[in-house]
Amino acid sequence: MSFRAKHLLGIEHLAPDEITTLLDLADSYVDLNRSKSKHSDALAGLTQINMFFENSTRTQASFELAGKRLGADVMNMAMQASSIKKGETLIDTALTLNAMHPDLLVVRHPHSGAVNLLAEKVNCAVLNAGDGYHEHPTQALLDALTIRRAKGRLHRLSVAICGDIAHSRVARSNLILLGKMENRVRLVGPPTLMPSQISEFGVEVYDDMREGLADVDVVMMLRLQKERMDGGFIPSEREYYHRFGLDAEKLSYAKDDAIVMHPGPMNRGVEIDGLIADDINRSVIQEQVEMGVAVRMAAMDLLARNLRAEPKEVLV
Ligand code: NCD
């Protein structure tokens, strides 16, 4: 077993063998989650605090369920009603919580880098549940597990990540993970939704869906992140769907057994045709949600093992 990390802040910091260790453990948690008795005591006695400064449905729910199934005491902070609204800084909130001796802190924040900053100030394990445009490591890991189970491997696959790449932490974490595991990644979308430093990643970039999807094994669609746009990125949703929305015709350019993924929440009829999203022969969107719980169980279990092994560091 190899997993050395103290925190899970991004895929950037994980080695390929650590990714494999985590996915292997997650596979065993899929079996536990499918059984009648879903409890383990891997996190018994530990306290998990979830701090979500941005809206979330599936990520927060699955972190909560993951912690409960492993026997942790789980607390969800209602950040909308917290002292942050009274002007308290993120760091002061974190230090206050830290004084309550949590063992695992799960944080989602709209600013890139905020979770890393917080990890420097507390003496528990911190898991990044999405920070700004930066990283969303558990999403990339659950996507990786979904791909590995559907395709039987996680290397030498051709994966097209499509749509709003510029605003997507999911795309960024997936790009890094799929690259580390030696897959070929293509980015497909309009030039206005491509990040400016895209050449650094060594990927192929397409602005035509049919060319971008040709012969790929995996089609990963992204939500058009309207809340992160200040206008002018796309002419209209109708036009966007026409050129970049995944429908049966565009999907026919991918391999016959290509799988369709989407991290959710979906804008049906904007980035994806509802019929494709619901097609159980092609879409693995529900499996992604299922894998999300297992991957978060595995991540917290591994961090807790390291926590128990290491002497607690002094707060800086
Ligand atoms: C993603 C996120 O929050 O970055 N959603 C998720 O975690 N399932 C993607 C998105 O919001 O589009």
Image (cartoon, grey):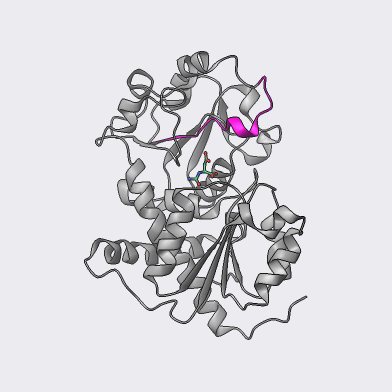
Residue nearest the observer in this picture, 133 or 196: 133
Which picture quadrant has residue 296? Answer: bottom left
Q: Is residue 111 above or below residue 200?
A: below
> Is 135 inside the magenta-drawn segment?
no
Pick out the residue farthest to the left.
36
Q: Tell me the quadrant of the picture where the N terminus can be found.
A: bottom left
Q: Name the residue at 47% across, 44% down.
A: 183
Q: Is residue 240 above or below residue 295?
A: above
Q: Is residue 160 above or below residue 246?
A: below
Q: At which x and y percent is residue 165?
A: 58, 34
Q: Name the residue at 63% across, 86% down.
A: 311
Q: At which x and y percent is residue 295?
A: 42, 60
State left or right for residue 34 relative to residue 210.
left
Which picture quadrant has residue 78? Answer: bottom right
Residue 264 visible? The answer is yes
Q: At which x and y percent is residue 14?
A: 57, 61
Q: Name the residue at 75% across, 65% down.
A: 92
Q: Is residue 259 above or below residue 129?
A: above
Q: At which x and y percent is residue 260?
A: 37, 35
Residue 21 visible? The answer is no
Stretch of the chain drawn in magenta? 219-232
State left or right for residue 55 relative to residue 301.
right
Q: Tell me the quadrant of the picture where the C terminus can be found.
A: bottom right
Q: Name the residue at 58% across, 36% down.
A: 203
